[in-house]
Amino acid sequence: MEIEELTATMGKYYDQRIVTALVGLECDVNKVDIVASAVTAFQNVEDAFVVTGDYDIVLKVRFPHYDEFQEFLVDGLGKIDGIRRMKTMMVLNIKKEMGQKIGE
């Protein structure tokens, strides 16, 4: 699937839904704190965690529209010096958030 086709499909899926995603960031080891400070400046970043494991920082982000989320990835995170790699995990369904079960 080409990127334009994928973007169109995701845009249709999230057309009437809030976009919630987790974004894993792999950073240059000596720039983790600088990157963490930079990403917390974005209004749509709800949570930012410095973690161990495959990523150095994990973000929870929320956007009203998919195109704004895409712009954030490319024009926001993509321009921060020190980020070596990103992995985006789209939230399909929320079962529990902030200690509260959802939909039960």
Image: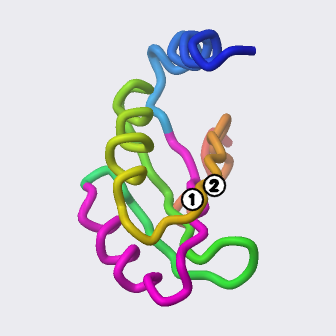
Q: Whole-Å distance between the Cαs marked 2 and 1? A: 5 Å
Secondary structure of the residue carrying tag 2 is strand
Identified by mark 1, the residue type is Gln
Report the residue marked by disc 1. Answer: 100
Residue located at (74% from left, 72% from top): 54
Other residues around mark 1 within 10 Å, as few (<14) / some (14–19) / many (≥20): few
- Asked if marks 2 and 1 touch (Cβ < 8 Å), the reply is yes
Provide residue 72's location: percent of width, then percent of height: 37, 42
Disc number placed over residue 96 in the picture, else none? 2
Residue located at (36% from left, 61% from top): 80
On screen, residue 20 versus residue 94, left or right, reads: left
Residue located at (60% from left, 69% from top): 26
Of all residues, the one furthest to the bottom in this rendering is 30
Provide residue 92's location: percent of width, then percent of height: 67, 35
Secondary structure of the residue carrying tag 1 is strand
Other residues around mark 2 within 10 Å, as few (<14) / some (14–19) / many (≥20): few
Provide residue 15's location: percent of width, then percent of height: 46, 14
Nearer to us in this view, 46 or 78: 78
Q: Is residue 33 magenta?
A: yes
* Magenta residues, start to end: 20-42
